[in-house]
Amino acid sequence: MDYLYILDRFLVYSHVAAGMLGLFAAPVAMATTKGGKIHRLWGKIFFWMMFWIMLSTFGLMFFRFNFFLLVIAVLSFYSALTGYRVLYLKRPQAGDKPQFIDWASTAIAALSGLSFMGWGVAGLFGVLEAGIPTAFFILGLVFGGGLLANAMPDFIRYFRPPTDRNWWWYEHMNRMLGAYIAMVTAFLVQNVGRHMPAEWQWVIWVAPGVIGGFFIGKWITMYKQKFEGKRQVKSAVAGTD
């Protein structure tokens, strides 16, 4: 019996199944009442699907190495992990402090981001073997920089907690939605990108992030305005007492 083949098939099929369930779970969580039972349930399902996607990706690297899927797996899971962990760090004034998992994951993310950026720089300067389109080395810089851009503010926040009492809400949205965008990107790369000319495949890697990032910004801004409006109303009511 070929145990390696069985392991490979298990990783592939479970990876795909987790991806499909994650693609369904996230929109359900988005569409339901924030903080409600359904939102929390499907949010947790999405998180654990992201966890398995990352683990299965690491396993699949032994059978067929794909640098960019590895990058996406690390970036997406770090976004999901920090989006989940922020719920346990949202009240620093009440004693919520970063734990070992927070420090360790952020350190790993920062080092990974630097490594991905280093790969991109090495490719652009011709250190790596030819045959890879230049656009992909630039993507290495972009995704590595994105991972580093997530990790460094986390380090700063661990040392200097935010004062805005709704900061965790915005960060939860930003990270979880960012993880979902990364999942969508991986899905499109595997199912659409492979059918495109090599010189245009980079578009599939970039488009979901650009489009999704725009709408994430709009959505977070909407909530900021909503919360600010509530604060102003409370202040006005308090002033009349």
Image: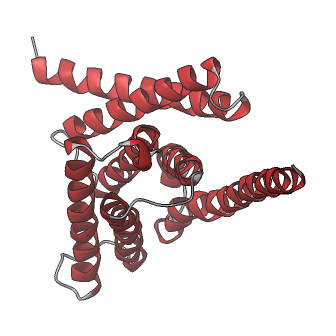
- Residue 78 picture location, percent across and down: 36, 48
Q: Quadrant of residue 151?
A: bottom left
The number of callouts visible is: 0
**214 relative to 135 in the view: left or right:** right
Image quarter of the N terminus: top left
- Residue 90 picture location, percent across and down: 47, 45
Q: Depth check: 180 or 192 in front?
A: 180
- Residue 89 picture location, percent across and down: 40, 44
**84 relative to 111 in the view: left or right:** right
- Residue 174 picture location, percent across and down: 56, 53
Q: Depth check: 157 or 33 in front?
A: 157
Q: Quadrant of residue 117?
A: bottom left
Please, is residue 217 above or below residue 166 in the view? below
Q: Residue at x 23, y 37 (%)?
A: 60
Q: Quadrant of residue 17?
A: top left
**48 relative to 62 in the view: left or right:** right
The colour scheme used to paint the residues is secondary structure
Q: Residue at x 60, y 28 (%)?
A: 24
Q: Residue at x 40, y 46 (%)?
A: 82
Q: Residue at x 67, y 35 (%)?
A: 30
